[in-house]
Structure formats: structure tokens, C-alpha cells
Amino acid sequence: MHVLFLPYPSPGHVTPTLPVARELLALGHRVTYAVTEEVAELPARIGATAISYDSPLMSTTNPPDEWTEDEFSRAFLQYITEITGTTAAIEKQLGEDRPDRIVYDITVWAPGRVLGRKWAVPTCQLVPVFASNDEYSLMTEQVEHADHPQLSEDDPAITEFRRLMAEFLSANDIDPDETDAIVAGKGEHGLVFHPRSLQPRGETFGADHAFVGPCLELEFEEADGWDWKPPRDDRPILFASLGTVVNDHPEFFRLCAEAFGEMPWHVVLATGGCEVDLDSFPPNFQVYEWIPYAAVLRHATAFICQAGMGGIMQSCYHTIPLVVVPYQPEQRISAARLVELGLAKRLLPTELTARGLRETVLDAVDDKQMLAVQQRMCADIHDAGNSPRAAEFVQNLPPVGGNH
């Protein structure tokens, strides 16, 4: 069996899928990744084939702090143009070597769903965030948490979107009347990288969604080989990161220096490429552009992150007191769910002060109830099945007639 993976082309989205692909390879299947050149070496590490396309998605850039309607309309149409444009590039790279399964990230849904229909092969969407069904809609939640204008149905951008989609589907021998069903992912199977207990309305999802939890094996292996050791003086360790995709917030890292510079703690910052003045950090700080979460969290006393799902899952796996500072709508949705479940403390960026951040971290460390909730979530992570269950789910996807 030949399985095609279409992840969002960034390390933070590719890496969590690699253990699943490695399981499929171990079962004797072939695996191909369609990614951009910048991350093509990642699947090669596990023996998968990589084909590359030159179509960077606009969401790899940092969005503005405040959207105007014109900016949002342009960005929306650029995104649609780019994700539909990748389809022809991927198809060309594959040539006659068509897959038997397509596994795609929800951010690049267009090539995954359209090529699946065009080739009549089973498809499955990778869900690194909350899944959606008739009872819970992540899109609705994103609209409610968004800081951008909402486009009405008669907005020129929506009209142009429908024209582009009709043209795109027709070019791929698909009825344009299927636009709404394809955009909504109607009938799609989902591979969800967190336990069902974290999912809002999780009890309403059926067997078409597998809540396999995080697949962390490769990240742990990478952490094992990382040259980082905790200090020998037994100081508490604070780890802070805003991830690797949307993290251009140097003021956050400066605030960490102000909040924890005089505390008897050892602080590790992962800037994710955000430009900071390394000489401005206090002596008790270690600053990396990137470091494996597990390398530090195995020893950490507390963790601050942006409420990305990777950070959330690792915090729960290691049962580390968690403080989240969500910047993007998706992150604010996750942060609200964490607070609802008692898994984290939350500070909105507009609320950030050095004193407030320091006190919130200390509150999290002292919160025994949070620790108990995290321990239950850790057990759910282990029970979810992880990479072996994910590979089995992909392998056993029903024929296309039962998938759409």
C-alpha cells in the first residue's frame, strides 16, 4: 500500500506525523511526503520518500496585530489560491505513482480532498487541533475568537472564492456543486492528535474519528540526543516557548527576563527564530532558537507556551504546571478549553505584566488540583493508542464509497 502524507510544511506539523509514517513503513507500506524543500529532509530521516513543491503558504508569515477588511480579504484569497495551486504541483511530482491512501493536514485540505475524489482513494485528515462535527465547529469558534473582520456572503472576496473553487474543481473533473461539501470536509475521517477527553463535545464523535493522542516517540528520541542538562544546583526550572510558526513577539521574551531575572530559578527560552537581543537576558537565562520540548520538560518545574497543541500535550505528558499566553484565535480556543478543564492558567497578551506573569507561574506550581487533572490527562494520553493505533486507522480506512 502506498500512503501519501500532505502535512502543513513546517517542522511543527511534519514532525508529529513521522512516528505514524514510521509505523506504516514497519508494516511494509510505502510512504511519500509532499512538502516544501525546507522540510523535505524530515521524512527522509525515517526512510520515507519526499517530493517537494514550491508553494509556501501565506500562513507561514506572521499576521498583522490588527486586520483591516482589505488585508483580510487579500490574505483569504491568497491562501485559497496557494492551497489550490499546490494540487497540480503535487500531482505532477507524483506522476503515475498514485497513492492508495491520502493523509492530509486540515490546513491543506484542498489538495487532500480533491485528489482523493479525483483518484477515488480513501482520505483522512490530520487534526492537530480540535476536530469538528455537527455538534462542534472549530470554524465557528475561530470566528468568535478572531481579531479580524468577518466577510459577509455577498463580500467580493467570498464571490471570488466561489469562482476560484468552481474553476479549481472543474479543472479536476469534480462537480462545482460539491464546493460546500468539500470545503466543510463532509464525510471525512479524522486522525486527531489528542485524547478524546480534551476534545470539546468529544462524546459526540464516532468511529470516523480516531483520538490517538500525541505521537511523541521521535521527539523523545531527539531529546535523548540533545546536549542539554539541568543545572546541578537544583534550582527550579522554567521553560518558555511560543512555538516555531507565529512567534514574532520579542516583547514576550523581554517580559520573561523582567519577570524571572531576579528569581532563584533557571529559565530556558526557545525563541523559535524571533529576533531578540541575546545580551539583554539575565545570567540565569539560557536562550535557544529551538530546543526539543522534552529535553527541558523532563526536568521542568513550570512551562509557559502559546497554547499550541504540541506544547499542551507535552505539558500533560510530563505533568508540568502550565501557563498559556494565546496570541492567535486557534490558540485562544485551546486556552479556553484548558481553563475549562483545569489544565492550565491563562494570561491574555493584553493582560501581560512582569508581575502578573511571575505570580501566575507561581500559582500554577502551587495548584495541586491542576496537577491531579494533568495526571488524569497523562493517563488518557497513554491509553489513546498513539502511533500504532494511528497507523492501524490509516491502514484500515474504508473504501472510497464509504468515505464520501
Image (cartoon, helix red, strand yellow):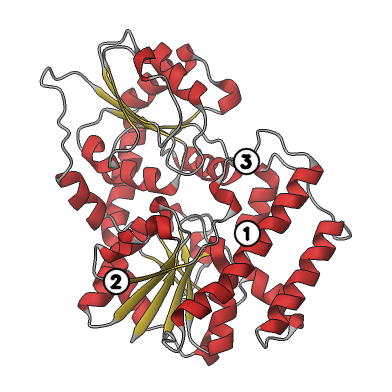
Residue 63: assigned label? 3
**Foreground residue, 48 or 270?**
48
Residue found 53% across the figure and 20% down from its top: 352
Q: Determine if residue 404 is in view.
A: no
Position of residue 187 relative to residue 354, above or below, is: below
**Foreground residue, 94 or 240?**
94
**194 left or right, relative to 59:** left
**401 left or right, relative to 43:** right
Tell me where residue 136 sits by quadrant: bottom right
**Foreground residue, 380 or 21?**
21
User: What is the three-letter code of the residue carrying label 1?
Assistant: Ser
Residue 137: assigned label? 1
Give x and y (percent) for residue 38: 41, 55
User: What is the three-letter code of the residue carrying label 3?
Assistant: Pro
Q: Are marks 2 and 1 in contact (CB under 8 Å)?
A: no
**Quadrant of the drawing holding the N terminus:** bottom left
Give x and y (percent) for residue 64: 65, 36
Residue 48: assigned label? 2
Distance of label 2 from label 1 (alpha carbons): 34 Å
**61 left or right, relative to 166:** left
Disc 2 packing (10 Å; few <14; some 14–19; many ≥20): some
Position of residue 175 relative to residue 180, above or below, is: below
Residue found 50% across the figure and 74% down from its top: 90
Position of residue 117 relative to residue 216, above or below, is: below
Tell me where residue 274 sits by quadrant: top left
Answer with mark 3 or mark 2, whichever residue precedes in sequence.
2
Give x and y (percent) for residue 297: 25, 37
